[in-house]
Amino acid sequence: MQKRQNFSRKRKAILDVLLSTEIHPTAEWIYQCLKPDYPDLSLGTVYRNLSRFKEEGIIVSVGVVNGQERFDAVVEEHEHFICEECGAVMDIKYQLLPDSIDQQLARSCGLQINSHSLIFYGVCSECQKSAKVSS
Ligand SMILES: [Zn+2]
Ligand SMILES: [Zn+2]
């Protein structure tokens, strides 16, 4: 019983970390965040919980950046920007695509569209600034 409670406490803590940040963290980042409060937490537990959350549809995977999977607790469809310099993953907060885009594609290609994801790659404003400073 004790063990089980402990498990769900960690599960909640992992989800809380994801919900409290917009940086689309890696499993490693979440692990480092929780380690001071949960000294017996293992990276494997974080990975296991993240993949379970994914299966449950509570979180989504944005993609792999510099070899590490990035997670998002915002599951509503939205677009992302990934900085190729620092690896930052940001939400695009503009409505870029018409709501009807899925239906348009379905109609013109005869496909059934369930969802879509769109990622832009480039250099974020912070990295552009530091490039200017150093040159
Ligand atoms: Zn950057
Ligand atoms: Zn996002």
Image (cartoon, grey):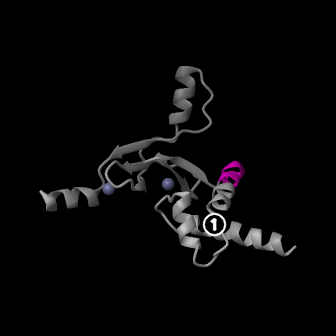
The residue labelled by disc 1 is 14
As rendered, which of 42 and 57 lies closer to the eye? 42
Residue 50: % across, % down: 64, 56
For this view, does 114 lie left or right of residue 67?
right
The chief SS type of the magenta part is helix
Q: What residue range appears in magenta?
A: 51-57
Residue at 57% x, 66% y is 31
For this view, does 69 lie left or right of residue 122?
right
Image quarter of the C terminus? bottom left
Tell me which amino acid carries mark 1: Ile
User: Which residue appears farthest toward the bottom when viewing the image?
Assistant: 37
- In magenta segment, residue 53: yes
As rendered, which of 53 and 112 lies closer to the eye? 53
Residue 110: % across, % down: 59, 21
The quadrant holding residue 13 is bottom right
| The residue carrying mark 1 has its beta carbon less than 8 Å from ligand 2 | no
- In magenta segment, residue 33: no
As rendered, which of 39 and 12 lies closer to the eye? 39
Residue at 84% x, 76% y is 2
Residue 75: % across, % down: 59, 53
Number of numbered discs present?
Answer: 1
Mark 1: give few (<14), some (14-19) or many (20+) Cα within 10 Å.
many
The quadrant holding residue 36 is bottom right
